[in-house]
């Protein structure tokens, strides 16, 4: 009996994924737990291992196809049971998420007579989109009017949710029901007027770079974050000379003894955690029912990859020493660049830190990682003349901290106090015992 390869749950909010690449082809032998395919979601790309040893007898969802969590992607015949005969594909029930080949007009006309149009239309949408549409009472005619932002113009879950949100707002204002198919299509706005779809005509010599699932997910998240949260950024300058001198003194011994590179990020995380304890409103999220204050302090660290950005999370950062933070920062960054992060590594963040200073940037105005209330940007450490005690001028190692915050949750005074506390924690940090910090 064949073993089913199903789409796993790759995170608490993941409902579907896109098949990036099959690492085996039909007829190949595969061992249990051997990487079988690569799947991309809106949060992470993952290798899916084989659930059993045997022969990959049938690939149900091809590369580029969208599959819902829990649905079959392939079949594996246990050793000794496989035959070379292909398993026939049921043409009458195409898999959701697989674009169907275009048919000649004559064949289409015949098919229209034999099959309901609704059945034909529903195949162009993923199971998740169809499920949400049915639950929210969105008709197929309405779906046809929504401009898709997914692969090949497909309507994604985000496209549908944006439409439903806009429809609810229109109903409150107009006190009307859902427009019927007989009404003009113009009654159903495809996109918010402030964000029209941009279609560029390439000029000679231009190169069009196709959007990867990760780049598309990043773009969607950035736009959604700016649309959701009123962003404000507060900036301070911190004197980190003692930390710079301390790190220079011990970094080689630290690497030899602990096997970990000691960067500045663990010190910054430690200072940030202390400020979050003092101002717990910053460690929160917005909801319609109220402001949710998080008990745990889980710090997301932005890691740049060639294809985009990912934010792995240090869980319970307030319970870790500088040494523990240094180990976890290096481990998460390495696994992020090697594409070895697990779904749990990018979940449940409550506050984020992004270090653009490593590339020489003095400061930036980072975008909040939803649904968090704020994000701290770290600038480059630069030596400059500074007025110190008794109006003397000294050369100090200075660093800008830029704190972007959700003004729905955090007032300007609290934001200023928080980022000033981070600065204070950095400038007064006790560096006498690294393990006990």
Image: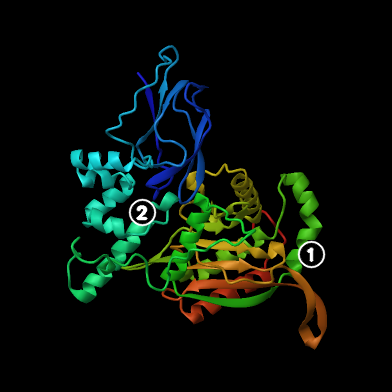
Q: Residue 157: which numbered mark, if any?
A: 2
- Estimate the x, y position of residue 227 in percent, counting from the top left: 43, 70
Q: Residue at x 58, y 62 (%)?
A: 353
Pinpoint residue 369: horizontal percent, then vertical percent.
Answer: 49, 62
Q: Is residue 253 left or right of residue 375?
A: right
For the point 67% across and 69% down, the residue is: 379
Task: Answer with the quarter of the image where residue 402 lies.
Answer: bottom right
In the image shown, does 16 or 389 lie closer to the viewer? 16
Disc 2 secondary structure class: helix
Using the numbered discs, state the Cα–Cα distance from disc 2 to disc 1 in whole angstroms: 51 Å
Q: Which mark is residue 245?
A: 1
Q: Earlier in the sequence, mark 2 or mark 1?
A: 2
Residue 318 in sight here: no
Residue in the picture at 47% in, 61% down: 221
Q: Residues within 10 Å of mark 1 (few under 14, many from 20)?
A: few
For this rendering, which residue is in front, 146 or 104?
Answer: 104
Q: Count the marks.
A: 2
| SS type, badge 1 | helix
Q: Is residue 130 above or below residue 73?
A: below
Q: Which mark is residue 3?
A: none
Position of residue 101 relative to residue 415, above or below, is above
Say if mark 2 contacts mark 1, CB within 8 Å.
no
Quadrant containing the C terminus in the rendered view:
bottom right
Instruction: Tell me if 190 is positioned left or right of 429 in this view.
Output: left
x and y, in percent, of residue 372 in the image = 46, 64
Q: How is the image coloured?
A: rainbow
Which residue corresponds to the image point at 79% horizontal and 50% vertical from the top-left?
A: 253
Rendering coords of residue 252 (x, y %): 80, 51
């Amino acid at each position: 009996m064949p073993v089913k390869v199903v789409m796993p749950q790759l995170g608490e909010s993941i409902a579907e994924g896109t098949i990036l690449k099959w690492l085996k082809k039909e007829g190949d032998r595969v061992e249990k737990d051997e990487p079988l395919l690569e799947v991309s979601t809106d949060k992470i790309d993952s290798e899916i291992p084989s659930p059993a040893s045997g022969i990959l007898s049938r690939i149900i969802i091809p590369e580029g196809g969208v599959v819902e969590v829990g649905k079959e992607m392939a079949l594996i015949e246990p050793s000794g049971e496989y035959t070379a005969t292909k398993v026939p594909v049921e043409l009458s029930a195409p898999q959701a998420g697989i674009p169907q080949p275009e048919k000649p007009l004559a064949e289409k006309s015949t098919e229209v007579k034999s099959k309901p149009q609704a059945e034909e239309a529903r195949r162009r949408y993923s199971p998740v989109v169809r499920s949400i549409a049915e639950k929210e009472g969105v008709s197929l005619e309405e779906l046809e009017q929504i401009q898709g932002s997914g692969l090949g113009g497909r309507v994604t879950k985000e496209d549908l949710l944006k439409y439903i949100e806009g429809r609810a707002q229109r109903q409150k204002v107009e006190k009307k029901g859902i427009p019927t198919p007989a009404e003009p299509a113009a009654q159903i706005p495809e996109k918010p007027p402030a964000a029209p779809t941009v279609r560029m005509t390439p000029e000679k010599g231009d190169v069009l770079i196709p959007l990867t699932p990760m780049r598309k997910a990043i773009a969607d998240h950035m736009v959604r974050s700016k649309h959701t949260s009123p962003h404000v950024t507060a900036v301070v300058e911190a004197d980190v000379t003692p930390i710079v001198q301390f790190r220079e003194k011990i970094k080689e011994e630290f690497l030899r003894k602990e096997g970990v590179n000691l960067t500045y990020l663990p010190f910054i995380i430690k200072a940030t955690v202390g400020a979050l304890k003092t101002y717990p409103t910053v460690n929160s999220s917005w909801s319609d029912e109220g402001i949710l204050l998080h008990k745990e302090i889980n710090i997301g660290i932005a890691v740049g990859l060639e294809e985009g950005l990912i934010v792995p999370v240090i869980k319970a950062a307030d319970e870790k020493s500088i040494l523990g933070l240094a180990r976890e920062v290096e481990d998460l960054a390495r696994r992020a660049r090697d594409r070895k992060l697990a779904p749990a590594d990018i979940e449940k963040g409550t506050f984020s830190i992004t270090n653009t200073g490593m590339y020489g940037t003095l400061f930036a105005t980072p975008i909040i990682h939803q649904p968090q209330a704020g994000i701290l940007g770290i600038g480059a450490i630069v030596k400059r003349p500074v007025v110190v005690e008794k109006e003397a001028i000294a050369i100090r190692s200075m660093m800008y901290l830029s704190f972007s915050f959700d003004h729905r949750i955090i007032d300007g005074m609290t934001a200023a106090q928080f980022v000033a506390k981070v600065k204070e924690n950095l400038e007064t940090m006790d560096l006498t015992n690294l393990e006990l910090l």
